[in-house]
Image (spheres, rainbow, N blue to C red):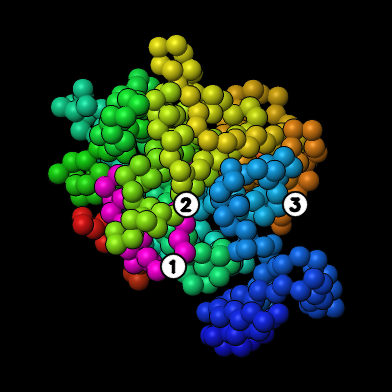
Amino acid sequence: MDTGSLLIIRNHGSTYNVLSNCLTAIRYRPSSLWITNNSIHKQLAQPYIVLADKREKKLFLMGSIAERWRELTGEKKWESLLEPLDNDLRKLIIHYGERTQAVIDAFNDEKVSRWVGLSRYSMKNLFRKVGLEIGNPYEYKITKFLYARSEIQILDWFCPGESNWIGYVAVTTDQGKAVLGRRDILITWRGTKRTYEMINDLQADLVSAADILGDNENPRVHHGWHSIYTAQDPKSIYNQTSARDQVLSEVRRLMDFYKDEEISITLTGHSLGSAVATLNAVDIVTNGYNKPTSRPDKACLVTAIVFASPRIGDSGFKKVFSGLKNLRVLRIENELDIVPSLPLPLPLLNYTHVGMELVIDARKSPFLKSHVDLNKNLMIAHQLEIYLHGVAGTHGDKGEFKLEVNRDISLVNKYLDALKDEHKVPTKWWMEKNKGMVQQDDGSWILDDHEPDHPPTLT
């Protein structure tokens, strides 16, 4: 399989050209194929993508995601894929969740750091530093970091607000395109991390979204999340333009750059990030950012796969969403997590969900501790790593928990004490080495917890 950088496979009259660096992507389409790896034989009865990791000398057997990507990203609104959960869809949901978890893992929340609120890692190194390169066939390149401003307008004279790193835009490499079947533009938004963002979460009154979506249907959305998405400050290093303007300009650039290829736009997020991702998705389709500038007839599918999403808008917002042809939203909700039930759909507020839902129950997992403390249960139920563990093993409302993908259970304990002690995994083990303290040549130590990146471009 070590065939160099260009591999041409002829199979049943078809030719597949796949660019490769570390991994070689090969598509097989026989009715039955035997693959040998260290005397272990796997018989494949359906189309598979076989990935050969030449460094690790391993084979990764992928399902037919590249063949089915339109179906898996909701072209038919996930008909017959959610109950029971289709295994290719399961893998794809976990993949997008891990890209959101990457922002959480890279976020610098060290209060004494001059870089607090930013990414610890550069765009080039982020996926490697958070463990998303080794053994991972879904290859992306980050093209832009996103920054959002949190502010409280009525207290602006006293509390000036702040800008923080909130996500990124990425695009599949040629390797990633081979595995996923198309050029995927990925937009990721993290959940609440900073105090100002917590205050924005509590601003649950509805405000007009006409500045984003137009006046038709009079859509209204959550005040705080509208502010995070649209706020800007000419004096800010990172938010001279809003998060909205940053993401839309980058989507436009990528859509035009890859205009001759098959493209998808996928958004993902957790908690607050799910709300912003949903608003962003509706914005993209409403205002035609899913079309190349020179090809307004070539609209691509926009899909939001979001975790622990609260309600974001009212019935007018839902009508706008429902009237958009190339937009899909899949919400993953974990039993006991109260965030998806917020804000409450009170008569005066009229909050409502949009899109399809997949409900999981991570409490069924035999790997997790059973906590008597309700508050601890509620906190654990909201964590993204718990969601991803739940997706890996869910078999529906009536089914038992059984892991269907090889996802390391150690990840559950990144920030939690949730795994049973018998698995011998330390609690809360994810942290920067020495909390970012680095020894100098003279033996002294300094806090050096940030890899420099250029500030976001303003064009």
* Badge nearest the viewer, 3 or 1: 1
Instruction: Check the image and report above or below for 443 versus 231.
Output: below
Query: Which amino acid, by three-letter code, is at mark 1?
Result: Glu
State left or right for residue 19 relative to residue 319. right
Q: Can residue 101 be found in the magenta stretch?
A: no
**Residue 267 magenta-drawn?**
yes
Q: What amino acid does circle 3 point to?
A: Glu
The magenta stretch is 244-269
- Whichever of labels 3 and 2 marks the residue nearer the N terminus, that label is 2
For residue 91, what is the image quadrant? Answer: bottom right
Name the residue at 62% across, 67% down: 135
Identify the residue at the far bottom of this view: 3
Quick one: label 3, few (<14), some, or many (20+) residues within 10 Å?
some
Q: Amino acid at mark 2?
A: Leu
Q: Position of residue 410 (x, y in %)?
A: 66, 51
**Whole-percent x, y for residue 318 in the image:** 44, 29
Do the residues under discs 2 and 1 have CB atoms within 8 angstroms?
no
**Total labels drawn:** 3
